[in-house]
Structure formats: structure tokens, C-alpha cells
Amino acid sequence: MINSIISKYEGICLYDERGSYTYSDLKNQIEKFRTILNKEILKNQNIVIYSDYNFYSISLLLLLSEFPVNIIPIVKTTEKEFSEKINSCMPNKIISFDNNGSLDIKNIDIISNNSKDYSIYTIKGDTGIVLFSSGTTGSPKIMIQNFSKLISSINKPRKKRSLIFIILLMFDHIGGLNTLLNCLISGSPFVIPKDRAPSTILDLIEKNQINVLPTTPTFLNLLLIDDNFELSRLSSLKLITYGTERMSEVLLKKLNTFLPNVKLLQTFGTSETGILQTVSKSSNSLYFKIVDENKDFKIENGELFLRSTTSVKGYLNHSNENFKEDGWYATGDLVEIDKDNFIKIIGRKSKIINVGGLKVFPSEIEEVLNSIEGVLDSTVYGQKNNITGNIVCAKIQTNSNEKKLLKVLIKKICRKKLDKFKIPVKIQFEELAINNRGKKA
């Protein structure tokens, strides 16, 4: 379906470090790969695309979307992560590309991956896409989305859009795939960065006059504190969409101050349910509403539950306790809801710190810390304690040379604004770890 839509488009499709590619280039590359792979691809196979976004990986993804196979996008990160994913999903083929875009096809002799679980969609003639959700421990959780249904769930606009996007979320991330599919279906040109360093993205926004930036709150904060940040470089931006983690009120206020002419939209979704259509109450509000006819929500004991036509059936290799028999999925996100049915995320259920039987939300303390002059960002977490069960700890990122004075100031402000049991007992100054998904590690 998606290939029949893009076949009608002309003009530039995407930009990368090698140059620009038109929709005609994309169509031609799909046909080149079809000639090579037509006899190679068998029904129900699991096929790894071992690559991040580029012209060739996108062409291959679009070709495979026509076949009853399971596509497994895996981005080149660490050898350990790659091995864990390969060993977990048991592919029949691993396809990568050389510098010229030629296919490197490695056939894997595995029989057990043609199980009923893997053929849940392909047996009906649909394409599946295998996604991984990292847990706190152990191997990555494996799930299969109906890729054909994901594609068909995206509404085609009445006319081709001219807004220029940049794709920051990775090729194997549900949010990144959602941005890609939306761009292709709407005919919007998009830019693929050679890396995801803030300075690189600032350069690309300025050079390519990018209009839409889909990203994470953590990355937005990195942009603001980057040495190369200048407001004039972002003059082309019209819309920033943010998601995958909770946005800080302090950061949202900064963004509205620095970028008053840019609309800020909070997105929401999970690999388990797909990306939801949302509207923010306003650019300076953390409240958003789910306006997706394909997705329902409810709140039980403060936790958000989702039910979707694009929900997976469960994990193939992990406990499915979050998937309920009536189709609801427990997201693990704790939320508030206002009288207008707008939702605000207040934290993850798994991140609550229990201090002597009292609940502490890290986000509440992070808001206080991030409002203090000299604090660029913070991460609050719990540490085991024999007396209280846990104590509150904080990692602080700062550019201040007076860390002792800053620590005194932090303690003073926390005593003023927080209950005693919420005040960080341990404060460390260090660069905050950012994972390859653009979120705090």
C-alpha cells in the first residue's frame, strides 16, 4: 500500500550526508532490490535489516513491507546488544549494506524461528515487524507488530506536505518508524543525520531549514546547553514533537522562552501499542489528550492503560502480565487527568522510591533541582538503605566550578520546598548518561 502512495510523488524525498534522493530514486532502488531478492524471500521468514536510517535501508524496508515476512530492524550499536538481539529473534537472513549500498546477505540455518508465534501475521499474508523493548535486566523483550496494519493506520493527507522533517529516533524505534512512515505517506521530505550529536543537529536544522523536529526531552535539553546553540539557527522550526520519556516543567518553560514561535506537541505511544494521535492542551502545558479513534485509554489506581487496534499480542520471550485478557495493556505510566480529560504523566510506576513506607516520585524532586541556577539537568533515584528501605539520591549535571557552594544551595532549597523524606541524601556531580535512544540511561 505505501509503495503505491509514494509512486505518485515527485521531487525530493530525503537528504543524507551523501546528498539528496528523489521519490523516483527511491522507487528505482526498491525495484533494484526486488530483482535481487524476489527469489530469496520466502514466506514466514525473519529478516534482519542491520542498519540505521539511510536511503538503502529505507528502500529495503519498503520492499519487504510487500511480503509476508517479519522485518527485524537492528541498529548498529554494541556487539553485545547485537548478539543478544540476534540470539533472541533467530533470523533466517541478516541483510546489511556496503558503502555503495550493495546488499550483503547472510543466510542463517535456523528452523525453530518458524514457530506459530512468529507467523501470527505472516500466515495471513501481512508483514510483521519485530521490535525490542529493553527491560531493566536480562535479555530484550521481543514483540511483533502487524506492520501492514501500522502502515494502514496512518491517515494519508489530502495533499502532499512541504514541511521538512529530521529523523532522530532510531530505525528500530517505534517512534522513529512512525515519523518515517508519516513523512513517506504525506510526501514530506526528511533529513537523516550522520550522527545524533547536538552540534550536528543544529547544523542540519540551519542548513536544511528544517521545520519539524521529533525528539526526546533529554535531547532538547542537550540542544539548549550545547556550546553551538544560537536562536537564529533554529529560525526555520515550526513544530517540535517530544515523547518517549517525561518532559520536565522547567525544561518546557525554557523551550517556550527560547522558542516562542515554535509549537510544542507532546506525543505518546509504546512499542506494544503503537504511537497515538495526541493534542497538547497548549505549548506550555504538560497535559495532552488522546484523540485517536483506533486507541482507547483508561486509568486504574493512577496507572494508564491502553487498548489499541495496533497492539501486539504479548512478548515472545518474557512475562505478559501487563497484557490483560480483555485487550488492555498496562503502560506502567502514572498519570493525572483533569476535568477536560487531558492527561499528565507524573512518572513511571517502576521508578517510585519507597522511603520508610512513603512514596517519592523522582519527577517531583527533579523539578525542584532543575529550577536551581547552575543545575543543567538531574536524575533522581533510590538507593537501598537498612533503616528506611531506600534513600533518595541525585545525580546533577552542572557547568559550575563552585560545586561545594552549589551543593549547599541545593540542600537549602530542597529543605525549603520538599518534605524531609524527599530531600536527596546523596548528591553527585557528573555528566548524565544518555543512551543511544536519546534518553537518560
Image (cartoon, rainbow, N blue to C red):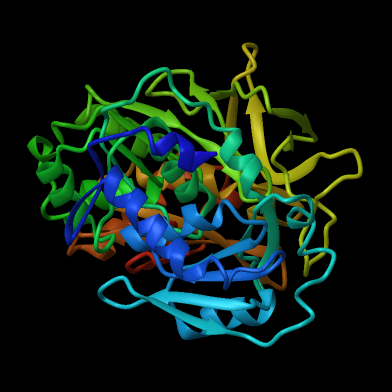
Estimate the x, y position of residue 393 in percent, counting from the top left.
52, 62
Left or right: residue 38 versus residue 236 is: right
In this view, the residue in front, 323 or 148, is: 148
Question: In this rendering, is residue 26 above or below 309?
Answer: below
Image-quadrant location for residue 257? top left
Estimate the x, y position of residue 293 in percent, counting from the top left.
66, 22
In this view, the residue in front, 127 or 213, is: 127
Left or right: residue 95 versus residue 99 is: right
Furthest-right residue in this view: 325
Which residue is painted at 48% across and 29% down in the image?
286
Estimate the x, y position of residue 357 in percent, counting from the top left.
77, 53
Which residue is painted at 74% across and 49% down in the image?
312
In this view, the residue in front, 1 or 216, is: 1
Question: In this rendering, is residue 99 above or below 175?
Answer: below
Image-quadrant location for residue 429? bottom left
Residue 191 can be seen, yes or no: no
In this view, the residue in front, 75 or 382, is: 75
Left or right: residue 380 versus residue 402 is: right
Estimate the x, y position of residue 404 in percent, counting from the top left.
27, 65
Which residue is painted at 32% across and 78% down in the image?
98
Which residue is painted at 40% across and 56% down in the image?
30
